[in-house]
Structure formats: C-alpha cells, structure tokens
Amino acid sequence: MKAEPVWDPEQHVGSWRAVWAYSNKRAARDNKTLTLQENRAKQVVAGQKAARTPRFVRTNNGAAELDEASLARARRLVGLKGYVTNIPADLMPAGEVIASYHDLWQVEQSFRMSKTDLRARPRFHHKRDSIEAHLTVVFAALAMARHLQQRTGVSIKKAVQTLRPLREVTVTFAGQTITARPKVSDDIRELIDRAAH
C-alpha cells in the first residue's frame, strides 16, 4: 500500500496545505454510500450483478474479488472532508479556511445572479488595465447589489426592476442645458428609505 504523503513546512516552502474537518452528518452519509458501494461490489464478485468494475472490486488472476484494503481505507476516512489552500496558516487558521469554504455558496450565488438580475453582458478585453477595470466595476456592482439585498430584504431582481425607471437625462440644445429628472414613485421611495436605514 502506498504511504500517505507527509507535508514538512520547511522542506515544502510555499506548498499548498490541506485542512481536514470531521462531521457526524457527513460520516452518516459517507457510511451509507460506502455500504451501498460495498454491497454492489459483493454482488459483482458473487456474479449476481453484471456491471463495469465498481469501486472496491479488483481483478486477481482473472477473478473479481472484494478489495478489502481499499474499503478499509475508505471507512477510516468516513466523515472527513479536506480543504486545500495555498494561504499560509499564519494568515488564515484552519477554522477560517473551512468557514470561508462554507461561505463560498454566497459568492457562487452572486455570480449566478450577476448574469441574470444585473444583466451583465460578456466583454472581451485584451489589455490588463481594461480587464482589471471591468472586474472592478462588476465586483462593485455585485457588492452594491448584495448590500442592497441585505439592507432591504428585497431580491436583487425585484430591486433592479423597481429602480430601473430612475434615469436622469441631461441634454444641451442651442446652448441651453436641460436636465430631465425621473418621477420617484412610492415603491422607489420606500425601497430607497429601507436601504438608507
């Protein structure tokens, strides 16, 4: 059996590190999954089920047999989840790494939201300054949208629909500048008030 790799911070400077967490809920789910996989493997070994070689089945001299070592190793890891990061432990302790991963769904939700609710269109930039400027605008819009959602309790889609009529136009004609300001409806006023408080 192959030995587990051992990480030495002095020998592996700048290497990624793994953080492990145990969960009873994950252990119960893992045990259930492993038992189903073990039963399927036993059925294939016994010739009761024809299938592509499933997990925990190995071939020895042309005969299928249960891979007890792999199954035992999998059972030892039940309930564990690993998180890999390149952030040093002195900058982010293990608990923060795990908490950040658990908060990742909010970032993913923001990106799903950005394409629909914010109507972000794809842009193709070739210069680093343009790319960074575009990313700054997108992240600023996401941050503002998320802040608005948290302050008002209104979905981003609803907030965008409500605020869309707020457009101010300035026109210069024959040397005279005219500014047309939008009418602020009761819905818009209520949303702005909720965001401000």
Image (cartoon, rainbow, N blue to C red):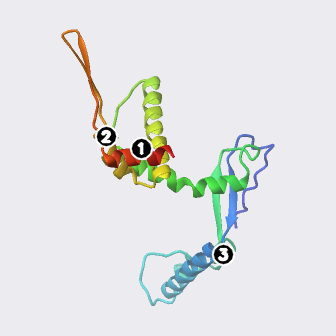
Asked whether residue 110 appears in the rendered view, the answer is yes
Q: Position of residue 4 (x, y in %)?
A: 72, 61
Asked whether residue 117 appears in the rendered view, the answer is no
Q: Are marks 2 and 1 in contact (CB under 8 Å)?
A: yes
Q: Are marks 3 and 2 in contact (CB under 8 Å)?
A: no
Say whether residue 76 is left or right of residue 63: right
- Tag 3 secondary structure: helix
Say whether residue 35 is left or right of residue 11: left
Q: Position of residue 34 (x, y in %)?
A: 57, 78
* Amino acid at pointer 1: Ile
Which of the two labelled residues, at mark 3 and mark 2, occupies the earlier sequence position? Answer: 3
The residue lying toward the viewer, choosing from 34 and 118, is: 118
Name the residue furthest right.
10
Q: Quadrant of the N terminus?
A: bottom right
Please rate how many residues cluster around mark 3, counting C-alpha atoms within 10 Å: few if below 14, some from 14 to 19, many from 20: few
* Amino acid at pointer 3: Asn
> On screen, 13 above or below 112?
above
Which of the two labelled residues, at mark 3 and mark 1, occupies the earlier sequence position? Answer: 3
Say whether residue 13 is left or right of residue 23: right
What is the C-alpha distance between the residues marked 2 and 1? Answer: 10 Å
The residue lying toward the viewer, choosing from 153 and 78, is: 153
- Tag 1 secondary structure: helix
Q: Quadrant of residue 123?
A: top left
> On screen, 189 above or below 134?
below
Residue underneath mark 3? 24
- Tag 2 secondary structure: loop
Residue underneath mark 1? 192
Q: Position of residue 59 (x, y in %)?
A: 54, 76
The residue at the point 61 percent across, 79 percent down is 28
How many numbered marks are there?
3
Residue underneath mark 2? 184
What is the C-alpha distance between the residues marked 3 and 2? Answer: 53 Å
